Image (cartoon, rainbow, N blue to C red):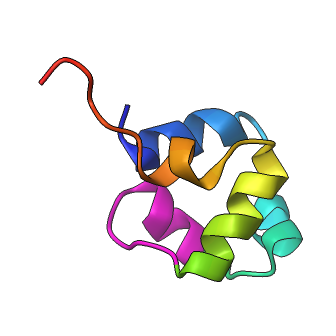
Amino acid sequence: METGTQLRALRGKRPQKLVAQALEITQSALSMYERGRRTPRDEVKRRIAAYYGRSVESLFFATDEHK
């Protein structure tokens, strides 16, 4: 699953604004990450992973096993 798709799925029905505030980023930045238009800095990757209880690797560096 692509990172943006995975981030949208993890957010679920929580408003982007609420998640962005918790991550200390702008709503615009979160939206761009979720659409795959931008990649977060390493520090932000760590905050996102911690917020969702996932590893940075599983969110941002997962490989497609079927290639």
In the image, residue 58 lies at what x, y percent? Answer: 54, 41
The residue positioned farthest toward the top in the image shown: 66
* Residue 39 is a magenta residue: yes
What is the magenta range? 29-40
Is any atom of residue 61 visible in this view? yes
Residue displayed at 84% across by 62% down: 18
Counting from the top left corner in percent of width and height, residue 28 is at 56, 77
Q: Position of residue 52 (x, y in %)?
A: 77, 45
**Residue 50 highlighted magenta (yes or no):** no
Residue 56 occupies which quadrant of the picture?
bottom right
Q: From the viewer's perspective, tell me whether residue 55 is left or right of residue 29.
A: right
Is residue 21 placed above or below 60 in the rendered structure?
Answer: below
Pick whichever, 43 or 25, lies toward us.
Answer: 43
- Place residue 2 in its image quadrant: top left
Q: How many marks?
A: 0
Residue at position x 71%, y 42% in the image: 54
Q: Residue at x 71, y 81 (%)?
A: 25
Position above or below: 45 against 43: above
Please tell me whether residue 60 is drawn above or below residue 24 in the rendered image.
Answer: above
Image quarter in which the C terminus is found: top left
* Position of residue 50 in the picture relative to residue 56 (left or right): right
**35 lies left or right of 24:** left
Q: Quadrant of residue 38?
A: bottom left
**Residue 15 can be seen, yes or no:** no
Quadrant the N terminus occupies: top left
